[in-house]
Image (cartoon, rainbow, N blue to C red):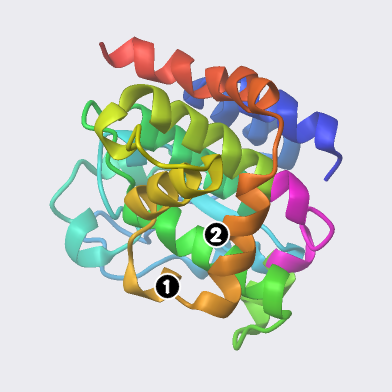
Amino acid sequence: MEREEIVKELSLTYNDLATYLQVKYGMSKYDYFHTPSCKSVNKKVSRTKEGLMCHHIDENVGYNLSEPSCAIQQPYVYQKKERLVYCNILEHLILHLKICSMDKDLRVNIGATILANKINTILLTDNTENRWEFRCLERIKDNYYEYIDVLKAFLAFLSTHLNDSVDSNDRTRRTQIIRIYKHAFSKNDLDSINIIERVYTDLSYYTETESIIMSRCFEKDYQEIK
């Protein structure tokens, strides 16, 4: 992906980004599950051979919509083909971070942590056990610094609204960034020092003004819920 396109996508609201991606990659031709019983995923929905992932647009109001046990408890309309969108894995992360910014408590959802972990693993170790994941990650193999930019923007947004997560006595901006990052991504599977230490380091070297400007991309969705 070109940096300009990533910045453009960041600038869109969650709903506008979902619409943009539906145009960019085309609409799904099938509902996510075969029937309203949500017992069987329709394999024809998958486009991982193209390196694309499928995202439920209504993840911003529902939860874990790809899991049968959770999906059956929620409106089936969330599973309709019109409510699905295809995206590459970095765009998928952006969608989930935008969902985080729509949470009044600014909680980071499991989708964001899982996606960040997958991106960390492939971009920093060039290793993944699953072929379909590799195809998805191939699409953004040259976008490590754009990935860092996305995280910077989100962390700058968080630091604005989570004042208690940044200790004013911290001596360096790097320490503050790490504290915010740990607040956002505290899952055990994100704690591999060899992988995450580089992310910490790269997050600490940035132009603060640029990151604050980019963080406004998350403000649009945040303000809509207030």
Residue 71 is tagged as none
Query: Would you say residue 28 is visible in this rendering?
Result: no
Q: Compute the Cα span from label 2 to label 1.
A: 33 Å
Numbered range of the magenta stretch? 137-147
Residue at disc 2, secondary structure:
helix
Residue at left 62%, top 40%? Answer: 150
Going by the picture, which residue comes out furthest to the bottom?
A: 129
**Earlier-in-chain disc, 2 versus 1:** 2
Q: Residue 170 or 199: which is nearer the viewer?
A: 170
Q: Residue 46 or 155: which is nearer the viewer?
A: 155
Residue at disc 1, secondary structure:
loop
To which residue does mark 1 refer?
A: 191
Q: Amino acid at mark 2?
A: Val
Q: Does the segment drawn in magenta span residue 144? A: yes
Using a 10 Å C-alpha cutoff, classify the residue at mark 2 as few (fewer than 14 neighbours), some (14 to 19) or many (20 or more). Answer: some
To which residue does mark 2 refer?
A: 45
Q: Position of residue 92 (x, y in %)?
A: 56, 48
Q: Above or below — where is 139 with respect to 156?
A: below
Q: Amino acid at mark 1?
A: Asp
Asked which quadrant contains residue 34, the reply is bottom left
Using a 10 Å C-alpha cutoff, classify the residue at mark 1 as few (fewer than 14 neighbours), some (14 to 19) or many (20 or more). Answer: some
Q: Does the segment drawn in magenta span residue 8? A: no
Residue at left 69%, top 44%? Answer: 205
Q: Position of residue 113 (x, y in %)?
A: 42, 58
Is the Cβ of the residue at disc 2 closer than 8 Å to that at disc 1?
Answer: no
Residue at left 18%, top 65%? Answer: 69
